[in-house]
Every structure is written in structure tokens, then in C-alpha cells.
Image (tube, rainbow, N blue to C red):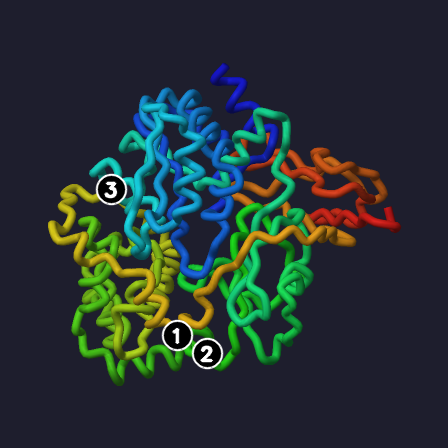
Amino acid sequence: MVMNIVESIRAAGVVGAGGAGFPAHVKLNGKAEYVIANGAECEPLLRVDQLLMQREAKRVVRGVALAMEATGAARGVIATKAHYHDAVHALEQALGGRNDITLHLMDSYYPSGDEKSIIFEISGRVVPSGKLPLDVGCVVSNVATLVNISAAVEGTPVIRKDVTVGGEVPHPITVTVPIGSPIREVIALSGFSGSRENFALIVGGPCMGRLVEDWDAPITKTTGGLLLLRRTHSLIARRTQSPERMLKVARAVCCQCSQCTQMCPRNALGLNVQPHKAMRALITGNGALLGDPKTIWACSSCGVCTNYACHMGLVPSEVMALYKSELSKNGIRPEPEMDITPDPFITYKRVPVSRLIARMGLSAYDVPAPYTETGYQPGSVTLLLRQHVGKPAVPVVRTGDRVHAGDVVAEIPEKSLGARIHAPIDGIVTRVDAKAIQVAGGESA
């Protein structure tokens, strides 16, 4: 039965829906003590997970149970925020008094949905740098991933994605759309009609999401949010400054107060991340002041240092990202910490989400984004061959082939880490190249 579960997940193309897209069949092909469902919705302004838990509570619970069966875990925990009242009620009803799966209600702090933070809060264990949650007996999956796992054993592949469209849009909404849908069309479902000249697009959340200039790029298996902000917004201005300006401003105003390090969630876990030393090394040009460079790998790029701790408008998280890139280029890899001692005052260092939102100038956009049935169907979809950790999927269709929703269009490369890709709509394959498969539906099909 365990092999049937894992094979069903592999066949359905399930990947981590809330993060980098790690193939779920690989994650569950191991032994664990805990299966943790991550319903904490780490990023501000997004509503996908809490609304999904309301609508699909039974599938969330079933997904946890299936993951427990696959990994041999004795305990399942669904972690979500206490103030998600409707979701909590739905999950309590779905659990029906079972004692092998429990609810863990969290305060509204950032980054509560960080994998290492959630493991520590539930188990008291810290995942060292370069190690996986399985190394401390845990498997963590986003609630959307678990819903997809539940659907996978029913024979339904991953072909649709829930997405919140928010920020400066007329009607913030959360919708379900076919994977591969053009972002531009999904944004329009909120009534948004602004231009790229005046607005910037963040794919993901405001803290860890990425700025995307191509509004015709497709929705992927990991897309959770589409946020529109004016290009004059301070968050966008910080993100788009040149490295030269970033260095110039840092040299002028960084006073080495170390607030960025004191407020760092990974530092509080005992992982020795010290952004202020990265700033010191940058502004002096002296790499020796960085300390042990391997500690940078423990940085999660959550952005607390940039968006909350620094009162000077600096971007320590961007500097950390630059150093991580340089370390990677030079072949320096993370090494597990030998002595991990979490800060005894860690709970006092947690950043309330409401205060983070206010500090980032986003309070006006912290509004409901209700789940909305739109009936949207794209005229065509673009299916990226890499929507997951690992190697790109290998196309098994050719231009001119007719496909139906749910058909496999790209396979996992032999003996490689990867995930299957399925057609989300009925249609005709109009393009196949090294990066993507395009399928046209509607009358053209």
C-alpha cells in the first residue's frame, strides 16, 4: 500500500505547492516520526492556504493520513494560525476526534510558515544547515500539497492551482486556474487594468516573492500569489535599486547596530546567521569580516532584516543573497552546525504580521481576498518543463498532437529528480521546445 501511495503521487506530478516545488514522491519515500501540514500561510496578504483549508479540510486530513502511512509516522500535526477561525472549525470537523492527527494553533507571527520555524515550534528540533527535515524525523508539506496527494490517490493529477490576486487591484480575489494560464489574464480576473509602466508585479508574497517583468509568463505548480504595487511604492523602490546604489547607501548609513542579526529568525533558532557581518564585509570590501561564510547558507531570505529590523532602509537580505550566490559559484557548500542552541527568548523576537505589514507600507492591502468561482478558461496554456526542484521534464508530445486534460505531456528524466507534467486543458500542442510546451484550446483545438 505504501508503494501504491508513493507511485500515485509520482504519477500525478505532485510537488511542493507552497515552496520550491520539491517532488512529493521523493519527500515521502523515507521514514519519519512527524508529518506536519503547513497551513500557516507564511507570506502576508496571501489567502490561498486558509481558504483552501476551509473548502478542502477533509482532503487536507486525508493527505496527512496518507503521508503518515507512506513514511510510517506515528504523529500528524496540522499547523495553522489561531485566528483562521473558519479554517480551524472546518479542520476540527474533518478530524472528527481522531487522536493520531492533531491541530497546532499558532500565533500570527512572521515567518511562522518557515519550514525550520514550524518544525522547532512543534517538535523542539532544529534542522541544521545542509540537512533535511527527515534528518530530524519530520516531513513538512504545504496544505495544498496534501490536498493534491489526496487527489492523486483518487487518480487526479495536478493541473490546477489556487492563486491570490492582491495588492492595488479593484477586487482582491483567490481563484483556481489551470496551470500554464497567462499571469496577465489571471490578474485581470480581479478587475485590474493597469500597465507595466506604472505597476510592478510580485509573484509570490511581498517578502520572499520575486519581481517579474513578463506579465505573459505562466502560472506554475508553485505560484501562490500575484501582487500588484505601484512602481513608486517603497517596497518596489528597494527591490529595484542597482547594486551600485545599494553599496553606496550602505556605506553612508549602516551603523552596525546589529538589529538585523538580533531580529533574524534563523539566528534565533541557533543557526548563527549574522546579516550585520555581511553588511560590514560589503561596506568595507573586507571579506574576512564576514566571519564563517558557511553560516550564510542558513539564511532563508525571509526578509525580516530588510523589511522590519533595519530602520535605515537598507537591504541586508539582498546582500545575503549576493553572498550566497558567490559562495555557490566558488563551490562552498553548507555544513551542519556542530552546536545549535536556540535563543531562550525566541518567542519574544517573533515579528507580529500586522506590524510587519504596517512597516512595509502594505496595511491598505491587508484585506480579504475571497475565493471566487470565475469560470475562467484560458485560450492557451504554456507548461514550463521546470516547475519543480530537479531536472526539467522531458516532453512526450509533439507539435500537432491532440491532448485532453489530465494527459501526461512531459515525463521525469530517467534516474533523475523531477516531476511529471499534465495537460490542464483539452487542446492541440502548438509548440514544444527546451523550456516549455504550449497547448491551444477552445475553437483552435
Residue drawn 81% across the image and 48% down it: 441
Labels 1 and 3 touching (C-beta < 8 A): no
The circle drawn on residue 120 is 3
Q: Where is residue 425 shown, x and y percent of the image?
A: 74, 43
Q: Is the residue marked by circle 1 packed among few (<14), some (14-19), or many (20+) residues within 10 Å?
A: some
Single out the residue that lies furthest toward the top.
Answer: 1
Kindly state the secondary structure of the residue where label 2 is placed: loop
Residue where numbered disc 2 is placed: 233
The amino acid marked with disc number 3 is Phe
The circle drawn on residue 361 is 1
Residue 55 visible to the viewer:
yes
Relative to 300, 347 lies left or right? left
The amino acid marked with disc number 1 is Gly
Labels 2 and 1 touching (C-beta < 8 A): yes
The amino acid marked with disc number 2 is His
Q: Is residue 218 above or below residue 244?
A: above
Give the number of the mark in front: 1 or 3: 1
Relative to 283, 3 lies left or right? right
